[in-house]
């Protein structure tokens, strides 16, 4: 359907509603990555979980979300994005209900695993529906809102987890999805238009290899971030995942209708977007993991207090994301990425060289979040700058894969560096400084990589090459 040149007020209102509804879905999905963070101690004592099982309550979601998201993006492009979104969101809501009423660890893990698969189907489909529901001129704003909520949702998860757990109990961090999700499901047919699929023979072998490979790498990284970092199983999972990825690449070169056009990975915009997303998510999720541990273990803060202390961090992410959304209309993506990563490096440095005061730590994390929020939106805008109607779902899935890999990698690396502090009975604030120093160095090195990798032209997400 062709877009009219001037959108009527009714069209503009419908597009605005579509952005709100679809971004609300993404907010819900990314909230569930970190909402469990602060609630874990209460969940573990409520269900009598072992340390290994309680870690998996958080990580099985990330593992399956990351593992299945490429298959989810391809399914959206094949069957039609809105149809797949309804299916994925329905599964996510059912899984949220299972998690909320769980009386045993096994039931909760099953619920969290199904949530991950539902999220993998929903996230790339929602972004694909978004790109198809707004006019070409409105795509920049839509992606800025989407990127902002993706970033803020991950940050807000820590605060919301602390507040909801303290006020209502841990069950409500899952139950809260149900009323929001049902409203969104009812609104979808009203505010969005169906996105037609492009029927082709499904590449089942490719889908199986990339799903198993990504899940194995995320699993290995997650395991490295727990007590098992030195075990042979951790290394075997990561190496096994890499071997499966290589096998996937070999299959994709031979099949007639590949699941992923490997040439897509050679596109500068896609490569740059994936790199920025891995770094931004790695720094952000790593910060939440180490930051909440520092505040709980070194300062003895309660779940409620940690939730409140992370509000400035969530606000920092939101402000950075909104600012980047506006700047990207005027400045090259490379410049915005460099500025954001530079700000992140300064904030991490402040957290690392803190004077032992929690205020310095929170200010440092909030400053880093301001930069990370800007990088987040730049990653989305860059990767989708040249998206066409038949690869929107797959491109969004590539960015979502980078999001999950980055989060798992950030937690794995920073928790390994803070291993002693995490296992000591009463660590001091200085025991966590190596982790923050490494994050600062990573952000600084990423500035140099971004200067070489991110395209210097303006990113204009118009669904095609734009001049």
Image: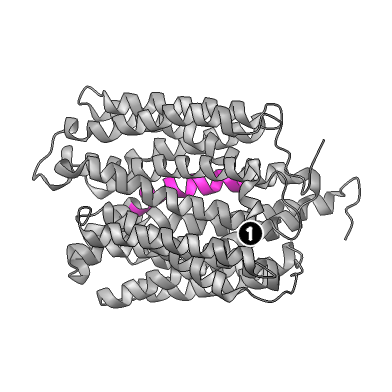
Residue that carries the numbered disc 1 in the rendered image: 394
Could you say where residue 388 lies in the image, as x and y percent from the top left? 75, 54
User: Looking at the image, which residue is at 38% across and 69% down?
Assistant: 112
Using the image, determine if residue 235 lies above or below residue 210. Answer: above
User: Looking at the image, which residue is at 16% across and 41% down?
Assistant: 421
User: Looking at the image, which residue is at 61% across and 50% down?
Assistant: 265
Residue nearest the viewer, comparing 175 with 429: 429
Could you say where residue 372 lies in the image, as x and y percent from the top left? 48, 35
Residue 67 falls inside the magenta stretch: no
Quarter-of-image position of residue 253: bottom right
Position of 182 compared to 220: left or right? right
Q: The N terminus lies in which quarter of the figure?
A: bottom right
Using the image, determine if residue 318 lies above or below residue 35. Answer: above
Q: Looking at the magenta stretch, what is its main secondary structure?
A: helix
Mark 1 falls on what kind of element?
Answer: helix
Query: Residues in magenta?
Result: 145-161
Could you say where residue 52 lies in the image, as x and y percent from the top left? 21, 64
Outermost residue toward the left in this view: 425
Residue 152 falls inside the magenta stretch: yes
Task: Give the class, few, some or many, for how many residues have Cα within 10 Å of label 1's Cα (few <14, many ≥20).
Answer: many
Using the rendered image of the protein, determine whether residue 178 is visible from the camera's viewpoint: no
Using the rendered image of the protein, determine whether residue 125 is visible from the camera's viewpoint: yes
Position of 244 compared to 74: left or right? left
User: Looking at the image, which residue is at 89% across and 56% down?
Assistant: 2
Q: The C terminus lies in which quarter of the figure?
A: top right
Could you say where residue 84 lies in the image, as x and y percent from the top left? 63, 71
Quarter-of-image position of residue 74: bottom right
Position of 168 compared to 323: left or right? left
């Amino acid at each position: 359907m062709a877009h009219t040149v001037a959108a009527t007020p009714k069209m503009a209102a419908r597009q605005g509603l579509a952005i709100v509804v679809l971004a609300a879905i993404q907010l819900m999905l990314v909230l569930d990555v970190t909402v469990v963070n602060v609630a874990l101690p209460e969940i573990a004592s409520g269900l009598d979980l072992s340390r290994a099982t309680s870690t998996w309550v958080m990580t099985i979601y990330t593992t399956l979300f990351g593992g299945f998201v490429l298959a989810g993006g391809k399914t959206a492009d094949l069957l039609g994005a809105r149809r797949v979104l309804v299916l994925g969101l329905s599964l996510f809501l059912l899984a949220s209900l299972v998690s909320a009423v769980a009386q045993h660890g096994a039931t909760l893990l099953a619920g969290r695993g199904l949530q991950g698969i539902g999220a993998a189907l929903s996230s790339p489909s929602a972004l694909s529906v978004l790109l198809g529901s707004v006019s070409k001129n409105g795509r920049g704003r839509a992606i800025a809102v989407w990127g902002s909520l993706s970033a803020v949702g991950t940050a807000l998860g820590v605060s919301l987890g602390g507040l909801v757990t303290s006020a209502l109990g841990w069950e409500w961090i899952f139950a809260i999805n149900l009323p929001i999700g049902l409203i969104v499901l009812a609104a979808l047919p009203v505010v969005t238009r169906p996105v037609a699929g492009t029927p082709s023979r499904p590449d089942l072998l490719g889908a199986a290899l990339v799903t198993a490979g990504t899940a194995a790498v995320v699993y290995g990284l997650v395991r490295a971030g727990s007590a098992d970092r030195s075990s042979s199983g951790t290394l075997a999972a990561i190496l096994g995942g890499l071997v499966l990825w290589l096998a996937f690449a070999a299959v994709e070169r031979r099949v007639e209708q590949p699941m992923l056009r490997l040439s897509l990975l050679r596109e500068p915009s896609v490569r740059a977007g994936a790199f920025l997303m891995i770094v931004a998510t790695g720094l952000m999720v790593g910060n939440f993991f180490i930051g909440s541990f520092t505040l709980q273990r070194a300062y003895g803060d309660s779940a409620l207090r940690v939730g409140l202390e992370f509000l400035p961090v969530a606000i920092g992410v939101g402000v950075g994301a909104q600012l980047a959304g506006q700047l990207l209309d005027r400045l090259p993506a490379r410049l915005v990425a460099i500025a954001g990563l530079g700000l992140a490096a300064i904030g991490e440095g402040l957290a690392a060289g803190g004077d032992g005061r929690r205020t310095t730590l929170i200010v440092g994390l909030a400053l880093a979040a301001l930069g990370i929020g800007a990088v987040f939106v730049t990653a989305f805008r860059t990767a989708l700058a040249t998206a066409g109607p038949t690869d929107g779902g797959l491109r969004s899935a590539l960015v979502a894969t980078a999001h999950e890999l980055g989060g798992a990698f950030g937690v794995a690396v920073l928790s390994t560096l803070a291993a002693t502090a995490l296992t000591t009975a009463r660590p001091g604030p200085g025991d966590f400084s190596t982790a923050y120093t490494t994050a600062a160095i990573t952000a600084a090195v990423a500035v140099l990589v971004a200067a070489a990798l991110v395209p210097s032209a303006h990113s204009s997400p118009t669904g095609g090459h734009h001049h």
